[in-house]
Amino acid sequence: MENEIKFQNLRMIALEKGGNYSLNISIASGIVDFGVTVALERRDYEVISTDELRATLLQAAMHHPFQLRQTALTENEQRKYLDIILHSPESEVENFLTELDHGPANGAISNMVHITAKRDYQSLRDGNWFN
């Protein structure tokens, strides 16, 4: 049996099939759109299926590095993003996302969350990802 969770605004689908879990994320990069599949553990799938905000934050954080082949996340980096964004306390998630957003993402994560979740952009840039 296959279970599928589609996220309307995120262009992302979480799948469970025969005890295997994955996340398919659509990536827009210039004039090219492509998909990336990230392996999930059951605990990841459970959080993604029940916590829309954390799912939104994960999609936004993963979208930016996958836009370029040179910055695509390795499996270890994907695991780090999943562990922190889905399973860490809110304060750790906020520190992680703010560091990425103010560094290599240059505002792309906060902008994506602003667009997809209608969250206040300046509040996100200030590091308030959960408020």
Image: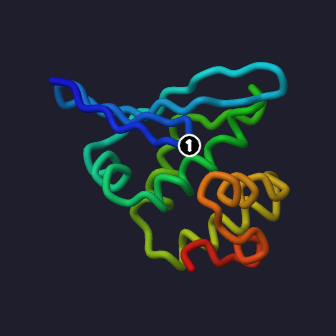
The residue sitting at 68% across, 34% down in the picture is: 66
Tell me: residue 90, above or below residue 106: below
Between 103 and 124, the one lying in front of the other is 124
Q: Is residue 128 left or right of residue 8?
A: right
The residue tagged 1 is 10
The residue sitting at 48% across, 62% down in the picture is: 53
Query: Percent from the top left, x then y, of residue 35?
Result: 58, 23
The residue sitting at 81% across, 64% down in the picture is: 102
How many marks do you count on the picture? 1
Q: Quadrant of the C terminus?
A: bottom right
Residue 5 occupies quadrant = top left
Between 120 and 125, the one lying in front of the other is 120
Colour mapping used in the image: rainbow
Dot 1, crowdedness within 10 Å: few (<14), some or many (≥20)?
Answer: many
Q: Quadrant of the N terminus?
A: top left
Between 118 and 15, the one lying in front of the other is 118
Tell me: residue 73, above or below residue 82: above
Give, as a three-letter code, the residue at label 1: Leu
The residue sitting at 48% across, 30% down in the picture is: 24
Q: Element type at marker 1?
A: loop
Query: Percent from the top left, x then y, of residue 75?
Result: 52, 35
Query: Percent from the top left, x then y, of residue 31?
Result: 82, 21
Residue 28 occupies quadrant = top right
Tell me: residue 10, above or below residue 32: below
Query: Percent from the top left, x then y, of residue 19?
Result: 18, 31
